[in-house]
């Protein structure tokens, strides 16, 4: 009995017991099945509707508009937004490697680049390197490439920079969208954003429930225009 209790304690300590229990009762198997079925269906529909060309950049913006680009990476979306609208753009990229690529590529005075990420608190985190799928973690494995990055509250940035209104906020930040949206909702800065374009990710615990709660609150200020679950969705200010 003592040996068994020690084994159970060891699993709990390593955060494996709860995961193992969920798997045993079938939750993880069902979750994996539903996840793959839902995502495949939505991705197929997205490409069938030619979403990258017909939806993601279909906004009535101009040089007087303000665009926030969260998760700029190498700047493909940033480049498209600038070519189409010549707007005032605020682009955020926590990785120094990709920030330097952006800095060398975009020299226009209307493009403002920032080498930090956005969250619901001002904190330093570990960014696990995975190209355009790089994500934040509390710690890393020995086999992973990573860097320490700075995170800031978007609501604080909006106040500090005296941002009066955001015409479009494009958000592809590999799971951190949950924290950013919670910050915007709690601070009520969400009402300063006309168009929200969100890519929700599945790399968070209870991601379905978190998305449900966030979108439920978001409906108070915004209307859902179109949605491809865990691909892209658009919300417009009421």
Image: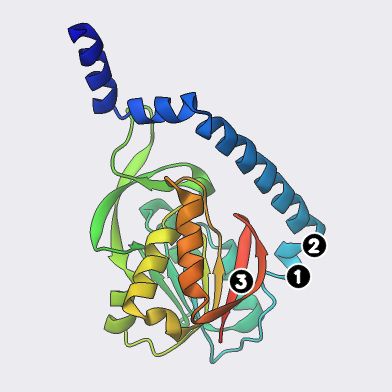
Image location of residue 124, percent across then percent down? 24, 54
Q: Is residue 56 above or below residue 46?
A: below
Image location of residue 65, percent across then percent down? 54, 88
Horizontal side of 49 relative to 34 (left or right) equals right
Which residue is labeled 1 in the image?
Answer: 54
Task: Find out whether the residues at labels 3 and 1 contact each other: C-beta distance under 8 Å.
Answer: no
Q: Is residue 188 above or below residue 113?
A: below
Horizontal side of 81 relative to 157 (left or right) equals right
Q: Residue at x 76, y 50 (%)?
A: 44
Does label 2 or label 3 sit earlier along the sequence? 2
Task: Find out whether the residues at labels 2 and 1 contact each other: C-beta distance under 8 Å.
Answer: yes
Task: Return the residue nearer the eye: 6 or 71.
Answer: 6
Task: Return the residue nearer the eye: 71 or 204.
Answer: 204
- Which quarter of the figure has residue 122? bottom left
- Which quarter of the figure has residue 156? bottom left
Q: Which image quarter is the C terminus in?
A: bottom right
Q: Residue at x 41, y 57 (%)?
A: 176
For disc 1, the neighbor class at 10 Å (few under 14, some 14 to 19, many from 20) is: few
Which residue is labeled 2 in the image?
Answer: 49
- Between circles 3 and 1, the one closer to the viewer is 3
For disc 3, the neighbor class at 10 Å (few under 14, some 14 to 19, many from 20) is: many
Q: Residue at x 56, y 38 (%)?
A: 31
- Image mark count: 3
Task: Return the residue nearer the eye: 110 or 203.
Answer: 203
Residue found at the very far right of the displayed protein: 48
Which residue is labeled 3 in the image?
Answer: 234
Image location of residue 1, percent across then percent down? 21, 7
Q: On residue 86, which mark appears?
A: none
Asked whether the viewer can see residue 16, the reply is no
Q: Is residue 47 above or below residue 92?
A: above
């Amino acid at each position: 009995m003592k040996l068994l209790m020690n084994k159970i304690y060891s699993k709990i300590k390593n955060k494996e017991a709860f995961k193992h229990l969920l798997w045993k009762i079938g939750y993880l198997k069902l979750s994996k099945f539903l996840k793959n079925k839902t995502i495949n269906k939505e991705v197929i529909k997205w490409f069938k509707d030619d979403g990258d060309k017909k939806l993601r950049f279909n906004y009535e913006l101009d040089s007087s508009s303000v665009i926030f680009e969260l998760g700029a990476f190498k700047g493909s979306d940033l480049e498209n937004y600038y070519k189409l609208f010549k707007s005032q753009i605020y682009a955020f990229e926590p990785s120094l490697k990709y920030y330097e690529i952006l800095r060398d590529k975009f020299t226009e005075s209307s493009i403002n680049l920032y080498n930090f990420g956005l969250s619901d608190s001002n904190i330093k985190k570990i960014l696990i390197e995975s190209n355009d799928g790089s994500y934040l973690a509390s710690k890393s494995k020995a086999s992973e490439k990573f860097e320490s990055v700075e995170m800031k509250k978007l609501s604080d940035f909006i106040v500090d920079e005296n941002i009066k209104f955001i015409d479009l906020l494009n958000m592809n930040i590999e799971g951190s969208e949950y924290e950013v949206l919670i910050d915007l909702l709690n601070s009520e800065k969400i009402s300063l954003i006309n168009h929200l374009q969100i890519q929700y990710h599945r790399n968070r615990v209870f991601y379905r429930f978190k998305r449900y709660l966030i979108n439920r609150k978001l409906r108070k200020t915004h209307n859902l225009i179109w949605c491809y679950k865990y691909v892209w969705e658009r919300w417009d200010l009421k």
